[in-house]
Image (cartoon, rainbow, N blue to C red):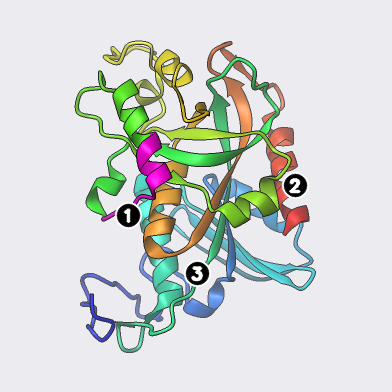
Amino acid sequence: MNQSTKLSEADLIINPDGSIYHLNLLPEDIADTVITVGDLDRVPEVSKHFDSIELKKGKREFITHTGYLGKKRITVISTGIGTDNIDIVFNELDALVNIDFGTRTINKELKSLNIIRIGTSGAVQPDIPMGTILASSHGLGFDALMHYYEQNLSADEQSLLDDINQHFSGLEGIKPYLTQADENLLKQFAHDMPTGITATAPGFYAPQGRQVRAKNVVANFIGQLNSFKGNAHRITNLEMETAGIYALAKTLGHKALSINAILASRVKFEFSSNPNAIVEKAITTILERI
């Protein structure tokens, strides 16, 4: 799209107060460093560590706090669950920093945000204990979000994705996508953390290999995940947002990193008895490194 092309009122919806449609935010409301969390109740669990909070806004499941940790301005925002919500949050965050709302045109100078997800996840490898804070080296999507967007994969990404497609060739109608973490954010925040490929599912129950009452048609999905090995990589954990975050951030020119608080072992059928402490450890670890 040409930068001078005016975006229609249907493509870019702006509220009467000048805020973006779903997030209810103005361009000046967000910092260049953004922490995303799935659970709206986790937003104050992050911002309670700020030295000051200048803004609190909310609409639907999207709660935003912006403030300062020392001299560093930080925004924390809840995305809700799933990559469909990631589609909303990331397109609207990008619009806030890269589109002139007055003229409805793309800015000549584009800004790149640093976006860090702090979320919960279940391990699919037996040697990853509950309580681990794990960084996603890649996001592997089993959802359909990125089939609606153009992607430009690096040679390494394409090679690894080819191996993944071969391994999961028996999954009919599912075409995974893959994106690497931003290398600089990975070095800054996760230099001493275990890393691995994080698989992202489009649901919590059957799409993550769980069976309650409805029949699951994918046999041994967890076993298929933990048996993959390619280019010295393995799939370590499973959740519902990381792949969409990595792929859409890269498509829009932003940098992203996903930090996973491991609350469950999917191979040992265990769930943490103290999940809040694990999440708090992930939050404080990242804030200390900002």
Question: As displayed, is residue 20 above or below residue 162?
Answer: below
Magenta region: 150-160
Q: Is residue 194 above or below residue 182?
A: above
In the picture, measured across the screen, residue 237 lies left or right of residue 271, that is left
Residue 68: image x %, image y %? 72, 69
- The quarter holding residue 39 reads top right
Q: Residues within 10 Å of mark 2 (few under 14, many from 20)?
A: some
Which amino acid, by three-letter code, is at mark 3? Ser
Comparing marks 2 and 1, which lies closer to the viewer? 1
- Residue under circle 1? 152
Helix, strand or loop for disc 1: loop
Magenta span contains residue 241: no
Kindly report which numbered mark, 3 or 1, lies closer to the viewer in this rendering. Answer: 1
The quadrant in which the N terminus is found is bottom left
Q: Position of residue 223 (x, y in %)?
A: 44, 13
Q: Which residue is pictured at 38% across the width and 11% down the height?
A: 220
Report the quarter where the C terminus lies: bottom right
Q: Residue at x 34, y 47 (%)?
A: 84
**Label 1, residues with CA under 10 Å away: few <14, some 14-19, many ≥20:** few
Q: How far apart are the two marked residues, 3 and 1, measured between alpha carbons?
A: 17 Å
Q: Amino acid at mark 2?
A: Thr
Mark 3 and mark 1 in contact? Answer it, CB < 8 Å.
Answer: no
Q: Residue at x 47, y 77 (%)?
A: 26
Vertical arrangement, residue 269 with respect to residue 124, above or below:
above
How far apart in space, not on screen, are marks 2 and 1 (Cα)? 32 Å
Residue wearing tag 2: 285
- Of the two numbered discs 2 and 1 on the same chain, state the one appearing first in sequence: 1
